[in-house]
Image (cartoon, rainbow, N blue to C red):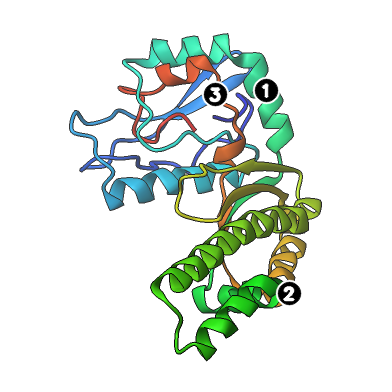
Amino acid sequence: MPRASHPSLPKDMGGIGEPARPVRILRQGELAALVSDAPEDLRPKRRDLLAHQNVLAEAGAGGAVLPMRFGSLSPDDEAVAAVLTEREDHYLERLSALDGRVEYNVKANHDEEAVLHVVMAENEQIRALAEANRKAGGGTYEQKLRLGEMVAAAVQAREAVDAAELQGALEPETDAVSPGPESSGWLANISFLVDRDAAEDFLAAVERLRQARPHLEIRVNGPLPPYSFVEPGPAQHAESGAAGAAGME
């Protein structure tokens, strides 16, 4: 979703479907929506996902665009126009805030062997119990169980520390932060809003963190359209269907 004054898309750009539905521009007030018709059996197929991403990339090259996630549907063009009218102030504010910025998603987990060395080095009680068990030929069942519980608790505590340190190390290089779901299977799953011109500084900060915390496995995905910073309101769920090939972007 760009401003109404946004440059037009390349001629004959295709959206989703087979054959590809043409992408068109719906203008309403100061906003516009990039949409296409959607097939009845819309599914997240690779070809359609790539078409959605291509529209975002082409439109984003011409200025700020609010990305809608793949599969956003609306019954008709009039419903899309109604959303643009209802949410105009919010979307205009977001377009200004996100202009020239991209999203980087950073996920982190522990290297299991490396983090065990870390918690052993940090916790004298764990080291003492492990040494006592070793001298006793492995220790009793209860002693082994106690050691395992202590190690598990220490690793869990270390997860919270590392997640906070990761965000603290990277946040100064960014304009905004959006934590992901805690149940994602990662100790950290955080999206950062980064000025496009400062992307190299952000990635350098990630590499410094890798060097300083070798027990962390860090994965970076980006640059991405700023999905996590659109701040969807209640009306967003009514978007894009007959107007949904590229979603509302």
Q: Nearer the viewer, mark 2 or mark 1?
A: 2
Disc ID at residue 32: 3
Above or below residue 37? Residue 198 is below
Please state which of residues 63 and 75 is positioned toward the viewer in this rendering: 75
Furthest toward the left, the residue is 41
* Residue 110, position as x, y percentages in the image: 54, 68
Q: Nearer the viewer, mark 2 or mark 3?
A: 2
232 with respect to 206 (left or right)? left
Above or below residue 93? Residue 200 is below
224 with respect to 93 (left or right)? left
SS under mark 1? helix
Disc ID at residue 168: none
Seen at 66% across and 71% down, the residue is 125
- Compare marks 3 and 1 and give the one earlier in the sequence: 3
SS under mark 3? strand
24 with respect to 147 (left or right)? left
Disc 2 + disc 3, Cβ < 8 Å: no
Measure the alpha-carbon separation of dots 2 and 3: 45 Å
Residue marked by disc 1: 92
SS under mark 2? helix
Q: Amino acid at mark 1?
A: Leu
Disc ID at residue 212: 2
Seen at 71% across and 24% down, the residue is 93
